Every structure is written in structure tokens, then in C-alpha cells.
Amino acid sequence: MMGGVAALAGAIVLGPRIGKYGADGKPRPMPGHHIPMAMLGTFILLFGWFGFNAASTFAATDNRFTVAAVNTAIAGAFGAVVGMAYVQLRTK
């Protein structure tokens, strides 16, 4: 709770991003700014999930290790496909 309250206080003090609102007060869209860094962060998270899900749960000789690794890979791939489809449908 302490972290959430501190984050809320920081967000209130900082306010919205510069350029988020126009002179008339209407919000402007702010699309992603640096897609390669977003992709790098996504791959780092996926690598971490492999370490957490597959490597930390069972021994490498156990058959359940492969199930955890394959499920993690499929989840990452499915999330990427759904994300691309959503952006494609949303932005035409």
C-alpha cells in the first residue's frame, strides 16, 4: 500500500505529460515513441519468465519442465499475435 500511495502522490505532483492536452483542454493521442526499446523490454520480460516458470520450478530432467517451457513460449507468441491483431484492427 505504501508503494501505491507514493506512486499516486508522485503522479499528482508531476501531473500529465507535456503535450498530452491541447490549449483547449482536449486530450491528444500519444502513440508509442520508441518501438525498438519497447520490443527489447518485451524480450527481456519473456526471458525472465522462462527463468521463473521453467527453470525455477522443476529439474531439467523432469518432463514437466518442458511443459512449463512450452506453455511460456506459447503464451508469449499468442500475446504477440493478439497484440498485432488489435493494433491492426484499431489503426486500420
Image (cartoon, helix red, strand yellow):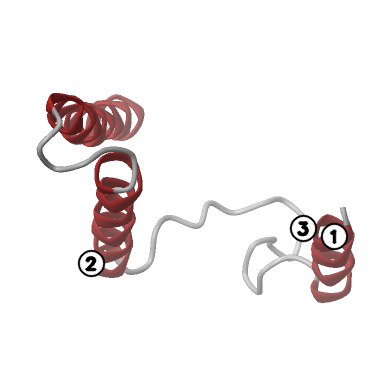
Label 2 vs label 1, nearer the camera: 1
Callout 3 crowding tier (Cα within 10 Å): few <14, some 14–19, many ≥20: few
Left or right of 76? Residue 70 is left
* In the foreground, 21 or 17: 17
Mark 2 is on which residue type?
A: Pro
Residue 72 falls in which quadrant of the image? top left
Q: CA distance from mark 2 to mark 1?
A: 29 Å
Residue 24 marker? 3
Task: Give the percent coordinates (x, y) of residue 61.
Answer: 10, 37
Residue at 69% in and 61% down: 21
Query: Which residue is label 2 attached to?
Result: 36
Mark 1 is on which residue type?
A: Leu
Left or right of 49? Residue 67 is left
Mark 3 is on which residue type?
A: Asp
Q: Identify whether 21 is placed above or below 56.
A: below
Task: Give the percent coordinates (x, y) of residue 29.
Answer: 53, 51
The reply to whether dot 2 and dot 3 touch (C-beta < 8 Å) is no
Element carrying mark 1? helix
Element carrying mark 3? loop
Q: CA distance from mark 1 to mark 3?
A: 26 Å
Residue at 81% in and 62% down: 3
Callout 1 crowding tier (Cα within 10 Å): few <14, some 14–19, many ≥20: few
Element carrying mark 2? helix
Residue at 29% in and 69% down: 37
Q: Identify whether 68 is placed above or below 28.
A: above
Left or right of 46? Residue 2 is right
Left or right of 88? Residue 31 is right
* In the foreground, 82 or 92: 82
Task: Give the percent coordinates (x, y) of residue 1.
Answer: 87, 52
N-terminal of the pair, mark 2 or mark 3, is 3
Task: Give the percent coordinates (x, y) of residue 69.
Answer: 18, 35
